Each structure stands twice: as structure tokens, then as C-alpha cells.
Image (cartoon, rainbow, N blue to C red):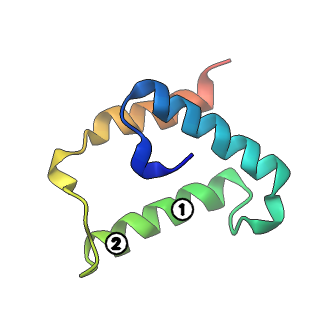
């Protein structure tokens, strides 16, 4: 699934399932296979890309609290 085609919750959920399946089937293509490495590199990308001249994101428009809650729930939800 292409990121640019995500238009809502259902698309985002489908993207997450596809991302998980891709990690299982194509793990050799992934730079970060552990959850700590994945989260640390995500944080690093956010720090770097938000300062990049190629930055095309409206960082003020993002709901970081909602995104943090989604990530946290992945830790505790069964």
C-alpha cells in the first residue's frame, strides 16, 4: 500500500497490517527488526527530516498525542 493513498483510519490500519506482513516476509530488507531499533530510528528520522530542506510535512498539523497513544497501545493491547 502506498503511503500517499492513505486517506483515513481504515487505510491506515490496512497499512499497518501490510507493514507487519512485509516485515515477516521481507525482513532482510528491513534496517530495524527489533521494536527498540524501529522506535529509535523513527525518532531519529523525525528529528532529522523535520529540519531538512526536503521536509514536506506540516508538523504543527499532526496530532502527536493521538499517535503516541496508538504506539503505546501496541505495547499493552492484547
In percent of the image, x 72 and y 64: which residue is there?
Answer: 30
| Residue 34: % across, % down | 72, 55
Q: Position of residue 6 (x, y in %)?
A: 42, 40
* Quarter that holds the N terminus: top right
- In the structure shown, which secondary structural element does the residue marked by tag 1 occupy? helix
Is residue 6 found left or right of 77 in the rendered image? left
Q: Determine the residue positioned at 29% across, 42% down.
A: 64
Element carrying mark 2: helix
Residue 70, given in percent of the width and then of the height, sits at 46, 31
Residue 2 position (above or below residue 53): above
Along the line of sight, which residue is nearer the eye, 27 or 44?
Answer: 27
* Count of marks overlaid on the render: 2
Residue lying at the far top of the rendered structure: 78
Compared across the picture, whether 25 is left or right of 51 comes to right
Which residue is denoted by mark 2 in the rendering?
49
Q: Residues within 10 Å of mark 2 (few under 14, many from 20)?
A: some
Identify the residue at image location x=60%, y=32%. 75
Q: Is residue 19 above or below residue 39?
A: above
Q: Is residue 73 rendered to the left or right of residue 20?
A: left
Q: Residue 17 falls in which quadrant of the image?
A: top right
Residue tagged by mark 1?
40
Residue displayed at 66% across by 40% down: 18
Extreme-left residue of the structure: 60
Local packing at callout 1 (Cα closer than 10 Å; few below 14, some 14-19, many 20+) is few
Q: Residue 5 placed where, x, y %?
A: 42, 44
Residue extending furthest toward the bottom: 53
Q: Earlier in the sequence, mark 1 or mark 2?
A: 1
Q: Kindly report the distance in space between the C-alpha atoms of the residues bearing marks 1 and 2.
A: 14 Å
Say the numbered circle drawn on residue 13: none
Amino acid at each position: 500500500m502506498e503511503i500517499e493513498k492513505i486517506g483515513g483510519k481504515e487505510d491506515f490500519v490496512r497499512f499497518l497490517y501490510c507493514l507487519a506482513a512485509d516485515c515477516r516476509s521481507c525482513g532482510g530488507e528491513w534496517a530495524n527488526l527489533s521494536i527498540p531499533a524501529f522506535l529509535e530510528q523513527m525518532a531519529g528520522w523525525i528529528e532529522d527530516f523535520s529540519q531538512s530542506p526536503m521536509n514536506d510535512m506540516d508538523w504543527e498539523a499532526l496530532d502527536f498525542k493521538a499517535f503516541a497513544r496508538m504506539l503505546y497501545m501496541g505495547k499493552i493491547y492484547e
